[in-house]
Image (tube, rainbow, N blue to C red):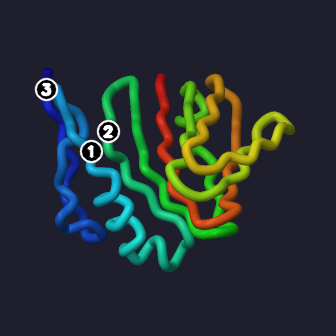
Amino acid sequence: MEEKHNNATKQRPEGARPLDAGIIPINIPKYIDQLKGEDAYQKNGKNAITVFKSDSVTITLIAMKIDSEFHPGKEENEATMSLQVIKGQVLFESLGNKVELKDGELVTLHQQLSFKTSAISDAICLLTMVK
């Protein structure tokens, strides 16, 4: 297996890290602190970091301030997904259905179905996409 890494960027100069390897320990509390400390979170009310990415699976940690929203791009619509709320409360909407999720709750959605997530309170979510 070839290991994959992301490169540091201007926004994350210390951001070089493995994205795909035989084993990748993921320190979620560390990433939560990082997301909340970055300018994007303060300016946009949300911020995210991909913590694992292979050809078929992407795992992204998302920090959202109250009233912020996120919805997937076109590529994500082609994946089966799960959204787990680590902390906080969100409103998940898809196909006219609305589901409130809070600490520790999870929702799944089949591929090619669009969705929107709105933060009812400050929230931390783990989004897993499987192609």
> Circle 2 — which element?
strand
| Residue positioned 81% across, 34% down in the render | 95
Q: Disc 2 versus disc 1: distance between alpha carbons?
A: 9 Å
Identity of the amino acid at label 2?
A: Phe
Identity of the amino acid at label 3?
A: Glu
Q: Nearer the viewer, residue 52 or 90?
A: 90
Q: Label 3: which residue?
A: 2
> Circle 1 — which element?
loop
Looking at the image, residue 58 sits to the left or right of residue 82; the answer is: left
User: Seen from this angle, which residue lies furthest left?
Assistant: 2
Q: Disc 2 versus disc 3: distance between alpha carbons?
A: 14 Å
Identity of the amino acid at label 1?
A: Ile
Q: Are marks 2 and 1 in contact (CB under 8 Å)?
A: yes
Question: Which numbered disc, 2 or 3, marks the residue that appears first in the sequence?
Answer: 3
Which quadrant holds residue 18?
Answer: top left
| Residue positioned 56% across, 31% down in the render | 81
Q: Label 2: which residue?
A: 52
